[in-house]
Image: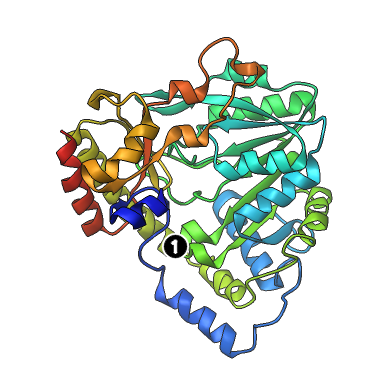
């Protein structure tokens, strides 16, 4: 879809990357690091000051007490953290349970590990996309090795509630599974939504790998500085795989992000700005004729094209550049192409969400206003 936007000159509301950089002080810190010689391999686990900053961040925000030497690992973005974790902890014969729709790398990493992908659908409601506890319990069984939870959730923008996460935690404990949480949008929540890390739930710190990154929080997605934390024996297993992936990366960016993590104001300011841009885009989509589930987190909003006569979101996305000069991504791209055993009793998630499209609002206000003006042509 990004290539389609480039070919047609359409406004790219498909791929979720900011069109402005993050705080200047963080860029200056990276420049200083380059000038001060941080240009060779950093330690494979990440520089100590960044691991300490991650531990301090988790203690300050969530009350988690981490050993930065044994329980924190710096990675090449959250993408590598996910890949190394799944490759380390799951394999043939194991099942990995995820939400559906799912971020595309979740399915790819499960396939690379040779494990079986089991999906639990998120259902659109006026209060966001929600989990059905019965379906969570049905998806988890004796072969479940990992339960991969993404909250705040891409692509739907939902923020799972404590009650929903407690259902996941209970299911994990019932079969002695490890929970892996993708929390890269942890600071980008809106209205009265509250992000609850699974590791903060009773008895879950010892069976949870928590993954996040600096890219979304500070608008430096190209720096690819991520991290994970969890029990020392699980982190060691993940590190053993990670050393044969990138081994290490981002030498001058690591000290800059360590400095950034001490600043709680920058993420709050970004979240406030994104909330206003979310409202601008949602109102424009509704005015254009879409039905919208207002997101409570992330960069993204899911809009239903069915009221406009488009039952196929993929077809709508292919035609949007000509119809309105805008690009989105069909939600079906974040769903399995074929049904699993859990889907046989009814429509697949891809079928249930076939008419829906994901748009991003992490663009400048003037870009979003122009996109809204163009989308009005659909009406």
Residue at 55 percent across and 74 percent down: it is 256
In the image, is 208 to the left or to the right of 159? Answer: right
- Quadrant housing the C terminus: top left
104 vs 251, nearest the viewer? 104
Q: x, y percentage for residue 354?
A: 42, 26
Residue at 82 percent across and 30 percent down: it is 93
**Residue under circle 1?**
219
71 vs 315, nearest the viewer? 315
Q: x, y percentage for residue 281?
A: 26, 44
Residue 205 in view, yes or no: no
Residue 34 in view, yes or no: yes
Q: Residues within 10 Å of mark 1 (few under 14, many from 20)?
A: some
146 vs 314, nearest the viewer? 314
Residue at 63 percent across and 28 percent down: it is 168
Q: How is the image coloured?
A: rainbow
Instruction: Tell me the quarter of the picture where residue 266 sits.
Output: bottom left
- Secondary structure at numbered mark 1: loop
Instruction: Tell me the quarter of the picture where residue 49 sits.
Output: bottom right
In the image, is 82 to the left or to the right of 231? Answer: left
Q: x, y percentage for residue 347?
A: 50, 15
């Amino acid at each position: 879809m990004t290539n389609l936007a480039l070919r047609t000159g359409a406004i790219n509301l498909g791929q979720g990357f900011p069109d402005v950089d993050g705080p200047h002080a963080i860029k200056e810190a990276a420049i200083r690091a380059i000038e001060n010689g941080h240009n060779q391999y950093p330690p494979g686990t990440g520089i100590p000051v960044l691991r300490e900053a991650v531990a301090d961040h988790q203690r300050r925000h969530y009350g988690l007490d981490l050993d930065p030497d044994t329980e924190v690992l710096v990675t090449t973005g959250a993408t590598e953290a996910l890949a190394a974790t799944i490759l380390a902890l799951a394999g043939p014969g194991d099942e990995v349970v995820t939400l559906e729709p799912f971020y595309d790398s979740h399915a790819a990493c499960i396939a690379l590990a040779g494990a079986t992908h089991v999906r639990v659908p998120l259902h659109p409601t006026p209060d966001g996309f929600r989990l059905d506890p019965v379906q969570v319990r049905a998806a988890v069984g004796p072969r479940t090795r990992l339960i991969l939870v993404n909250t705040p959730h891409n692509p739907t923008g939902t923020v799972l509630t404590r009650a929903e996460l407690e259902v996941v935690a209970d299911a994990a404990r019932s079969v002695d599974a490890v929970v892996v949480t993708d929390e890269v949008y942890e600071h980008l929540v809106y209205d009265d939504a509250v992000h609850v890390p699974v590791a903060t739930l009773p008895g879950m710190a010892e069976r949870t790998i928590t993954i996040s990154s600096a890219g979304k929080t500070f608008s430096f997605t190209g720096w690819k500085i991520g991290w994970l934390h969890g029990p020392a024996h699980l982190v060691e297993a993940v590190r053993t795989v990670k050393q044969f992936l990138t081994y290490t990366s981002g030498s001058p960016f690591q000290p800059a992000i360590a400095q950034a993590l001490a600043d709680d104001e920058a993420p709050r300011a970004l979240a406030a700005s994104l909330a206003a841009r979310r409202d601008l885009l949602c109102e424009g989509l509704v005015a254009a004729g879409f039905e919208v589930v207002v997101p409570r987190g992330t960069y993204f909003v899911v809009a239903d094209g069915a009221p406009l006569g488009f039952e196929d979101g993929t077809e709508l996305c292919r035609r949007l550049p000509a119809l309105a000069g805008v690009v989105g991504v069909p939600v079906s791209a974040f769903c399995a192409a074929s049904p699993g055993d859990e889907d046989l009793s009814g429509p697949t998630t891809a079928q249930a969400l076939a008419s829906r499209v994901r748009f991003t609002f992490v663009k400048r206000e003037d870009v979003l206003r122009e996109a809204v003006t163009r989308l009005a042509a659909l009406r």
